[in-house]
Image (cartoon, coloured by chain):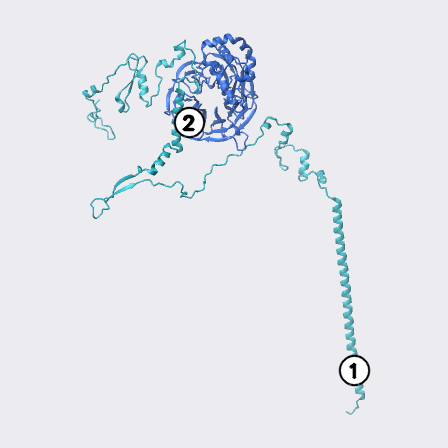
Chain colours: A cyan, B blue
Amino acid sequence: MFSSLLPLPKHSEYATESSKIKVAVPKADKLSQKVLSIPMQVSSEKTSIIKSDNEVNNGTISKLIVNKDGSVNYSQTIAISNNKDNRSVQTSYEDTIPLKKRYPNLKHHFPRFNLRDCPDNSLQTCVDDTRNVINKILNAKLGISAETNSSASSSANSNSDVNIIKYTSNSLIQDEEESRGRERIIQVRQYVEDPMLPPKFKLRKNRHKTPSPPPPILKNVNELESKLTKEDREKWKIPAAISNWKNNQGFTISLDKRILAANGGSVPGESQLETNLNIEKFGNLSTALEDADRKAREEIRVKNEAAKLQAIKDKQEKELQLKRLADLSRNQRKRHYDTYEGDIKRRPLNR
Amino acid sequence: MPTYRDLIDLDADDEETLIPPVDPLSEAMYNNTKMDYTFQNLKHTDEDEIIIDDDDEEDQNVQDNGTEQYDDNIPTTGDLQQQDHHSNTSDTSNWKLLRVLVGAHQGWVRSVEVDPITNKWFATGSSDATIKIWDLASSKIKATLTGHIMGVRALAISSRYPLLFSGSEDKTVRCWDLERTNSPSGAQIRDYHGHVGGIYSMALHPELDLLFTGGRDAVVRVWDVRSRADIMVLTGHRSDISSVQSQIGDPQVITSSMDGTIRLWDLRKQSTALTITQHSKSIRSMIVHPHEMTMCSGDTTGNLKQWLLPEGHLLNEFGKSESGKIINTLSINPASNILFAGYDDGKVEFYDYQQGTLTQSTSTTPVTGYTESTIYSSTFDMSGLRLITCEGDKSIKIWGESSI
């Protein structure tokens, strides 16, 4: 009750004092000026729209929608006030009742017209307008403006693009002569470029290429219709792999598979069939090899024998020579001795 | 307004005046215009004329019904008028499951589109990231387009160029040239980057080269088809955009969103022209009628609302509101004015588009191995004789109306 007399809490941001609240009360004479004098049109339409000059102030109602009897249609007015573009809004209770219930004798005849059979040109104008709007947006998006062609030709010969700017240099950098900054007049004009010149900048490789399209799945369409036969299905059947060493689950392994495994992946009967040697030529080869071997051995034996004989011959020769030498030396010594004995005999014994 | 009587001399005896010489180049275009022509006559003829036609041609129509419709897939005006009257008077239709393409895709089939020109093939997009093109008559696969890396949620086939557009959960929009489906370099010729969320729906402008896409990121992007430029971004929705539709006159783009609103866009101002907030739950499907200035939207409680187009007035509302009835897809039969609604639990409902009365309510039969089959996408073919539904059991189902 007396809370207004209590001191303010320190954290309070609000000023509760009545003196601080500002209330703008419009003056009486201004109000009287603003009152709208509504000209009432008695029209045959259900509702009529009155535009006021309030449109300058945002947020206020600029259009009053008035019923036929002159009363303001509040729901329509409020619903329309919020949107900027004049869209229609269904606001009345009657809008929720179907037309066929409201008018039980309503004939169901609402023909749709084509461009060809439309009685008036409303559809054609609608299409044309839309096409123009779309083209304008599209040109802006694609960067093809309708002005570019005209401006390109005009800018080349006219000087309308030339801007003349009066520029005052910074006052901090002062010239000696003038106290203020120096003034310059700058002419800015578009540099006209020759469009036929080669490009100034090197074209770089487009590094981010669009990925190549996915490979086509080439299917024979007619094949899709034919069903898989049993043989085809069996062809695709792949048996589960079972280890030969470990069979915890106890899968049955057929006998032929066991034999296969025991023989290291080959059927014993099959191996003979598979080794189809060319026996005749293989025999020829082996006999030829044997012959060659035998010949070689014979040659080696003959050579060895000859070498042996030669060695014996050499040995005998050597022995003979030694014997001769010994004989020779023996004969010489005997001769010498004989001569010595003969001398002694001949010599007189005078000593 | 000119009627077909002014354009074609029906009394001429020789067939050469009626039938133009065979031109293989313009054959497809001719088929389409012929079909369009027959349908638009239906709407613009005065009531008096219809009555006169009925008197004159009733006997012929009964005879023609069986033979001519099924022979060349182009119903005559007389047939159509009778169909129209038939749907007005009777409260039942009898659509039956004719063919099931089991295992059409490896995943949920999320989107389907019929070629608007030739009406001879349709394309489906799936969660297995492929687009498949099927022959409408024989239901045989014609081509498989791979390239997306996540599920394909939206498809659009251009009626002016041989191009197919696809939007995917992988945030990309791709453009496929259908004349290059067998080339080794692949059919894809363009892609449109810019979305920051998966794309759930797309539409092509009927006259201009514009592509509208919307999805997880709650914005509609407007692409120039040729230059791949992102022309506009239409912002305003608060949640995923579930369907995008386009038409010639204002509003040129209409979107529905998971925030429960439908927005009509003013393409010239790049802003919302009207926001319709009358659905209480999120809208998964919204479709514009091909021959009327109306559209229809269905929310996740089973409410269907019909709107009158230029201003977006509520025209009619129907459909029983229940908690579990999530409408996944809507499609309108252009010939007999039937509205099809496919539900999240596999329920199928046919409504009379003009009256809003339920004419048939059944359920799909899921493929063996599935207990329930969500209907993700549906479309009627251009002649209105077949309904194609794409479902969560990885199958495509083809429905036809059996003559009782």
Q: Toward the viewer: A68 or B364?
A: A68
What's the mark number on residue B208? none
Query: Which element carries disc 1, helix, strand or loop?
Result: helix
Q: Toward the viewer: A51 or A117?
A: A117
Q: Toward the viewer: B168 or A105?
A: A105
User: Seen from this angle, which residue lies furthest bottom?
Assistant: A350
Residue B101: percent from the left, percent from the top? Answer: 56, 22
A162 w.r.t. A221: above or below: below
Residue B134: percent from the left, percent from the top? Answer: 54, 24
Compared across the picture, whether A99 is left or right of A64 comes to right
- Looking at the rendered structure, the kind of residue marked 1 is Tyr
The answer to whether one can see residue B261 in this image is no
The answer to whether one can see residue A165 in this image is yes
User: Which part of the image, by quadrant, shows the N terminus of chain B?
Assistant: top left
Residue B150: percent from the left, percent from the top? Answer: 49, 29
User: Which part of the image, by quadrant, shows the C terminus of chain B?
Assistant: top right
Compared across the picture, whether A284 is left or right of B312 comes to right
- Looking at the rendered structure, the kind of residue marked 2 is Val
Mark 1 vs mark 2: same chain?
no
Q: Residues within 10 Å of mark 2 (few under 14, many from 20)?
A: many
Residue on which the image places disc 2: B222
- The answer to whether marks 1 and 2 mark residues whose Cβ atoms lie closer than 8 Å is no
Could you say which quadrant of the image residue A127 lies in?
Answer: top left
Residue on which the image places disc 1: A337
- Chain under disc 1: A
Query: Which element carries disc 2, helix, strand or loop?
Result: strand
Could you say which quadrant of the image residue A15 lies in?
Answer: top left
A202 w.r.t. A1: above or below: below
